[in-house]
């Protein structure tokens, strides 16, 4: 993206491809989610991988978030550097680089670490003891996604082992109920999966308490599951991420409306030869190659006049199909499949209100 974007520039003059966020929609999304979790009496700890923006993190805190969730040490480091007071690293702290980042970040922010076994925190334990600190640990519970996480029937033994490890303190349990999105467009099944995840996590927390351990946090996390999993009594925290910006996948399965999507990629038609498609300047390096819940391989959906889909992409070329009379030079606005992946492809967010640039926000921790 060119460096000549300035405050006050009109959308029609932006160099493309460019990632754009509608400030009004973003603010509305943040306020609505804060109100939703407050009504449930559940703490809100947004996953920061969606926006990777210090400005958005501060807006989330102002709206009532208690802190943030990170997946990488780069995100943890950025957040702990004066951006957020409390960071949950929802990733096993395996490897010296992750351990060192946790110890360093703990000097400037509260850092909580997620892991699914005592093996994953042995090196962190040694480093914490050497540093003279105690790191709170949340036990990762597999509630159905089958990615990381200890099975519920093995959770008590795992919690017992972590609680007995020097330099660590058992803080609670957490899950990522990604299986909710896999239910697709069926709202009844999505809710069933979300409630089941929440109930499984609460029951697991109760079993650990019965074994004599304090369980302070019982944390669920996903945008597709945020209307169901946190409604289960006993859940203390929700960690949605995509809700801040929205994306095409959430619109397609029905968890967000088109009006809730704050992010788009602006692109230009650069060729209409051959005639069966048009070529735009937004390929996978602008859109990411994250999959579509439509199941048709598209990398984005056009939401501006003329319509169509970005059916596939090379690095710098997008293949626009189904558009109404596309012409060279036309500007198209594309809703990405997945906001998190699309944001990570750009070095800054262009913030707009009424098609005028009002902010330029760096995208941090892209590696």
Image (cartoon, rainbow, N blue to C red):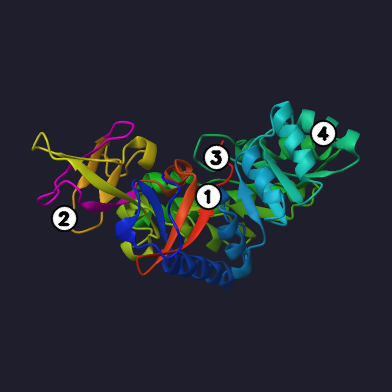
In this view, the residue in front, 364 or 152, is 364
Distance CA(mark 1)–CA(mark 3): 30 Å
Q: Which residue is mark 3?
A: 366
Residue 197, label in figure: 1
Residue 150, label in figure: none
Q: Position of residue 340 (x, y in %)?
A: 46, 46
Q: Establish if 130 lies above or below 50.
A: above
Task: Classify the position of the C terminus by image quarter.
Answer: top right
Q: Which residue is mark 2?
A: 306
Mark nearest the camera among 2 and 4 is: 2
Q: Residue at x 32, y 44 (%)?
A: 293
Do labels 1 and 2 touch, CB within 8 Å? Answer: no
Instruction: State whether residue 43 appears in this view.
Output: no
Do labels 4 and 1 touch, CB within 8 Å? Answer: no
Q: Residue at x 25, y 56 (%)?
A: 303
Mark nearest the camera among 4 and 3 is: 3
Q: Which residue is mark 4?
A: 125
Q: Position of residue 154 (x, y in %)?
A: 66, 35
Distance CA(mark 1)–CA(mark 2): 41 Å
Q: Residue at x 85, y 43 (%)?
A: 134
Task: Classify the position of the N terminus by image quarter.
Answer: top left
Q: Residue at x 76, y 33 (%)?
A: 100
Distance CA(mark 4)–CA(mark 3): 28 Å
Q: Secondary structure at mark 1?
A: helix
Residue 361 in the magenta stretch? The answer is no
Do labels 2 and 4 touch, CB within 8 Å? Answer: no
The local crowd at label 1, few if under 14, some if 14 to 19, many if 20 or more residues have their Cα within 10 Å, is many
In this view, the residue in front, 165 or 361, is 361
Q: Mark 3 or mark 1, which is nearer the start of the sequence?
A: 1
Tell me where the magenta segment starts and ends, as one range.
313-336
Q: Establish if 358 lies above or below 190.
A: below
Residue 238 in the figure: left or right of residue 108: left
């Amino acid at each position: 993206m060119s460096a000549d974007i300035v405050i006050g520039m009109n959308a029609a003059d932006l160099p493309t491809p460019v990632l754009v966020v509608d400030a009004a929609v973003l603010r509305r999304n943040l306020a609505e989610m804060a109100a939703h979790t407050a009504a449930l009496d559940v703490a809100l700890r947004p996953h920061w991988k969606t926006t990777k923006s210090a400005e958005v993190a501060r807006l989330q805190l102002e709206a009532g978030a208690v802190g943030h969730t990170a997946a990488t040490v780069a995100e943890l480091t950025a957040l702990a550097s004066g951006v957020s007071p409390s960071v949950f690293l929802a990733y096993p702290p395996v490897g010296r680089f992750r351990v060192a980042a946790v110890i360093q970040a703990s000097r400037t922010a509260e850092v909580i670490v997620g892991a699914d076994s005592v093996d994953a925190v042995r090196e962190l334990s040694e480093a914490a003891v050497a540093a003279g600190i105690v790191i709170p640990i949340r036990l990762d519970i597999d509630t159905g996604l089958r990615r990381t996480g200890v099975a519920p029937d093995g959770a008590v033994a795992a919690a017992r082992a972590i609680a007995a490890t020097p330099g660590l303190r058992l803080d609670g349990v957490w899950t990522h109920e990604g299986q909710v999105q896999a239910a697709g467009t069926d709202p009844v099944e999505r809710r069933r999966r979300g409630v089941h995840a929440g109930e499984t996590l609460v029951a697991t927390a109760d079993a650990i308490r019965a074994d004599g351990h304090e369980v302070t946090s019982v944390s669920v996390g996903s945008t597709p599951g945020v209307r169901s999993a946190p409604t289960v009594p006993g859940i203390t925290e929700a960690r949605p991420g995509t809700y801040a910006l929205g994306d095409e996948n959430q619109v397609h399965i029905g968890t967000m409306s088109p009006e809730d999507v704050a992010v788009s990629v602006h692109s230009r038609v650069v060729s209409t030869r051959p005639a069966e498609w048009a070529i735009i300047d937004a390929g996978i390096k602008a859109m990411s190659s994250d999959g579509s819940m439509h199941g048709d391989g598209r990398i984005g959906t056009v939401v501006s006049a003329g319509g169509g889909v970005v059916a596939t992409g090379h690095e710098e070329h997008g293949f626009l199909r189904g558009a109404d009379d596309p012409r060279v030079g036309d500007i198209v606005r594309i809703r990405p499949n997945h906001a998190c992946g699309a944001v990570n492809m750009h070095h800054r967010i262009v913030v707009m209100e009424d098609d005028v640039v009002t902010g330029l926000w760096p995208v941090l921790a892209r590696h």
